Amino acid sequence: MFTGIVTAVGRVARVTRGSTGLTLRIAAPYRGLAKGESIAVDGACLTVERAGRGWFQVHVITTSLERTTFGSATVGRRVNLERALQVGDRLGGHLVQGHVDGVGEVRRIRQRGDAWLMDVTMPPAVARVSIPLGSITVDGVSLTVNALPARGVVQLSLIPFTFEHTTLGERVPGDRVHLEGDTIGKYVEALLAAGPPRPRTRRRKKP
């Protein structure tokens, strides 16, 4: 579980492709990483397989490649990072699972006052659970839905700190980004789709 508050920006140092996915070595400032620990890389929850001073290594399986942009990862790519939430930590963003629901595309970026407005297309799975002033995760960053200007499009308002301390400040129209819809919204959608529970029938006792 994560909060969508990026704690570091890492850089892809090595990409190894294989028949069962690919392996990424990421340069990062974290210390004390343990094998098996979870780290959100651009919002995708990945498991640390190896770690050393100033780096860690993760494996991206085939199913994850199908839902993310890691398939086109290259050496030098900067990625947003967040270590898993610990019990008692401050929940500065919102509840983020690290399960990328789909890939969106940056459509438009413009500055308004001291903020930047970013329009991003959304796949249907994310659009269905996105509401104005609700939560959405973009490349691992917890953001508020500023508006829904068109069908399948979300407008985000980025404050200067987010723009400067995450990779979102590097995005340009045409870039693809990882999206995770609001967790609570997804549960509500699933419950409504299942319909009301069936009433239990009482069995008659035998005389």
Image (tube, rainbow, N blue to C red):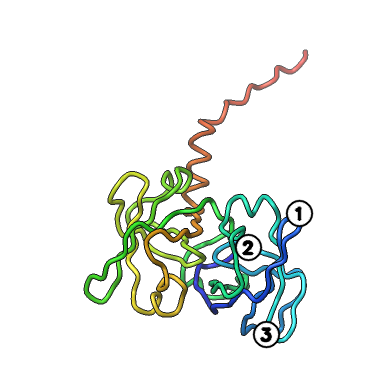
Q: What type is the residue that disc 3 sits on?
A: Gly
In the picture, residue 162 is in which quadrant? Answer: bottom left
Q: What type is the residue that disc 1 sits on?
A: Thr
Residue 16 on image: x %, y %: 72, 66
Q: From mark 3 to mark 2, how far is it between C-alphas?
A: 19 Å
Q: From mark 1 to mark 3, how far is it between C-alphas?
A: 26 Å
Query: In the image, is residue 9 above or below residue 60?
Result: below
Callout 2: SS = strand
**Labels 1 and 3 touching (C-beta < 8 A):** no
User: Residue at the location (45% across, 66% down)?
Assistant: 142
Residue 49 on image: x %, y %: 76, 69
Callout 3: SS = loop
Q: From mark 2 to mark 1, how far is it between C-alphas?
A: 18 Å
Mark positioned earlier in the residue sequence (1 or 3): 1
| Side (left or right) of 175 relative to 2 | left
Mark positioned earlier in the residue sequence (3 or 2): 2
Which of pointers 1 and 3 indicates the residue nearer the eye? 1
In the rendered structure, find residue 45 and report the number of the disc placed on it.
2
Which of pointers 2 and 1 indicates the residue nearer the eye? 1
The N terminus, quarter of image: bottom right
User: Residue at the location (42% across, 44% down)?
Assistant: 128
| Side (left or right) of 171 relative to 100 | left
Q: What type is the residue that disc 2 sits on?
A: Cys
**Labels 2 and 1 touching (C-beta < 8 A):** no
Numbered label tally: 3
In the rendered structure, find residue 54 and report the number of the disc placed on it.
3
The residue singled out by tag 1 in the image is 20
Callout 1: SS = loop
User: Residue at the location (74% across, 18% down)?
Assistant: 205
The C terminus, quarter of image: top right
User: Residue at the location (43% across, 70% down)?
Assistant: 168
